[in-house]
Amino acid sequence: MEIFPPIPLSQWKDSKETLHRFAQVIGKIRLASSPRRNHWWNVPYHVTGCGITTRPMGLVDGNPIFTIDFDFVEHLLIARALDGRTASFSLLGQSVASFYDNALAALRAVGVAAAIERPHPFDLPDGKRHFAEDTEHAAYDPFWVNRYWQVLSQVSLVLEEFSAGFSGKISPVHHFWHTFDLAVTRFGSRTVEQPAHVDPVTREAYSREVISAGFWFGDDAFPRPTFYSYAAPEPDGLAAQPLRPEAARWAELRGSHLALLDYDDARATENARDTVLDFYETVYRSAALLADWDVDALACPAGMTDPQALRGG
């Protein structure tokens, strides 16, 4: 299969808007049913061999252990309980409202009482509309949704490879239902005191120095699929640092900067995988050195930290 196949936002924007809200419905169940982890690591999705998963959850909310999976090959939502009970329904032909009702019914069928404290989208234009009232978002093109999963899977493995080169505190490679991006974050040791007006989601996400790498499929602000990387807080002079490949650029966003590499520019190169890895590494090294991280001590060559193995012993 072609690495990084085409996925122009214009071809699946309506499906993406619907799927994003589907993901938020289940994501909010995940939020309520999983043990709290630092930097919200308990909340995102993880890629599977046919879609994305919440991973097992329950117990902390009084429910049995259960998992919810999106299958983007058969186009199903599947709820499973530890005792073997399974309930599923087709993703085809669903509005957000019908998806919401069917998801709750599927969970009841496997013995789970789901609780969503705020049953409306987070940080989307229709954020005040209850999921059960959204009959507007009902597009679902199975070809493009499957293509989204294919791209997600490929980028996830590239980010896993990038992750392997760092031995410090690092997040999993995970898919956020908030911004619908895929990301991995490397952490420094210094605490960051956020201003009092900053929202609690952001405060927890950025309570330490971070350098993050990721990918998103495009939105109204950046209407093209794009690889990105940034540092927070941003060290002085970062946006003046050179980027590789030449097509990469710095962009200003809300007073800070993102390094951006257009997906189509990357896929047009001779070795797209290496191009993306080099892009991420370029940003990381520039940001880490400017922030006075011990880059050599945090390195993890070939994914190893054992000195004897590194010496070839």
Image: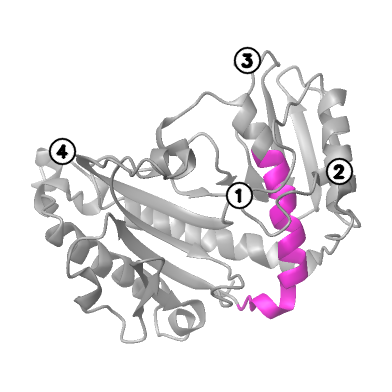
Which SS type dominates the magenta stretch? helix
The quadrant in which the N terminus is found is bottom right
Residue type at mark 4 is: Asp
Q: Is mark 4 on a helix, strand or loop?
A: loop
Lower position in the chain sequence, tag 4 or tag 2: 2
Q: Residue 59 carries which label?
A: 3
In three-dimensional space, the C-alpha distance between marks 2 and 3, rounded to whole angstroms, equals: 26 Å
The quadrant in which the C terminus is found is top left
Q: Residue at x 32, y 66 (%)?
A: 280
Lower position in the chain sequence, tag 1 or tag 2: 2
Between label 4 and label 2, give the one nearer the viewer: 2
Label 1 neighbourhood size at 10 Å, few (<14), some (14-19), many (20+)?
many
Residue type at mark 3 is: Leu
Residue 193 appears left or right of 218:
left
Q: What stretch is highlighted in magenta?
A: 6-27
Q: Is mark 2 on a helix, strand or loop?
A: helix
The answer to whether 148 is drawn above or below residue 194 in the figure is: below
Q: Position of residue 89 (x, y in %)?
A: 88, 43
* Residue 68 colored in magenta in the image: no
Between label 1 and label 4, give the one nearer the viewer: 1
Between label 1 and label 3, give the one nearer the viewer: 1
Which image quadrant for residue 272? Answer: bottom left
Residue type at mark 2 is: Ala
Between label 3 and label 4, give the one nearer the viewer: 3
User: Looking at this view, is 59 or 86 the one in front?
Assistant: 59
Q: Position of residue 37 (x, y in %)?
A: 45, 29
Q: Residue at x 32, y 72 (%)?
A: 279
Q: Residue 177 carries which label?
A: 1
- Whether label 1 touches label 2, CB < 8 Å: no
Label 4 neighbourhood size at 10 Å, few (<14), some (14-19), many (20+)?
few
User: Looking at this view, is 25 or 202 the one in front?
Assistant: 202
